[in-house]
Image: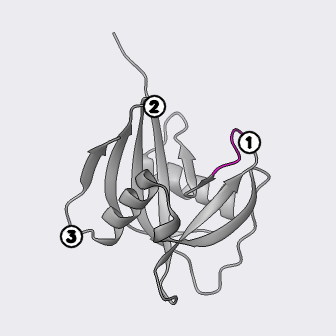
Amino acid sequence: MFILIGISSHAVIIKQDTAEPCVLLLKANYGEYSWGLPGGALEPGETIRQALLRECQEELGVLVQVKCLTGVYYHQAYDSQAFIFLCELDDSHNICLSEEHSEYQYTPLSRLSKVQKQRVEDCLSYDGVVVSRKF
């Protein structure tokens, strides 16, 4: 018997030239209109890296540079696994949001939800060992 759970890949993109590091968040045009990291669910046949690149291209209109996988998080509320990658944008990037999102902003870590903040802090303190947590 197979049990299917949700699997998604997300990018942590940091803006470091501010007093406090800030992370790129997108505001969804669906559901609860919440702010979240770029990324989304895997499609059949995709790897987690392929899904990350596709989702970021679709949502941001630019290719991201994937640095490393930093964490895997199980979210009980959604019965899903989220793979978090540290990524960068080229200096010449020009974000062009998809219809799924209405705006983007770089948000200070101090303003993130508890779960978001933990994932981003894990990403920023990556020491070569992928973190695994359960929320």
| Residue bounds of the magenta highlight | 30-34
**Mark 2 falls on what kind of element?**
loop
Q: Amino acid at mark 3?
A: Asp
Front in this rendered view, residue 127 or 31 = 31
What crowding class fits label 1: few (fewer than 14 Cα within 10 Å), some (14-19), or many (20 or more)?
few
Front in this rendered view, residue 112 or 90 = 112
**Mark 3 falls on what kind of element?**
loop
Q: Nearer the viewer, mark 3 or mark 1?
A: 1
Q: Alpha-carbon distance for marks 3 and 1?
A: 35 Å
Extreme residue toward the top, this view: 1
Dominant SS of magenta comes to loop
Q: Nearer the viewer, mark 2 or mark 1?
A: 2
What crowding class fits label 3: few (fewer than 14 Cα within 10 Å), some (14-19), or many (20 or more)?
few
Image location (x, y in percent) of residue 85:
41, 60
Q: Amino acid at mark 2?
A: Ala
Residue 99 drawn in magenta: no
Disc marking residue 111: none
Image location (x, y in percent) of residue 96:
75, 68
Disc marking residue 127: 3
Q: Which residue is mark 1?
A: 30
Which numbered disc, 3 or 1, marks the residue that appears first in the sequence?
1
Report the residue at 40% width, 63% height from top. 120
Asked if residue 37 is positioned above or below residue 121 in the image, the reply reads: above
Q: Alpha-carbon distance for marks 2 and 1?
A: 18 Å
Which numbered disc, 3 or 2, marks the residue that appears first in the sequence?
2
Residue 75 location, quadrant: top left
Q: Which residue is mark 2?
A: 77
Asked if residue 74 is positioned above or below residue 124 in the image, the reply reads: above
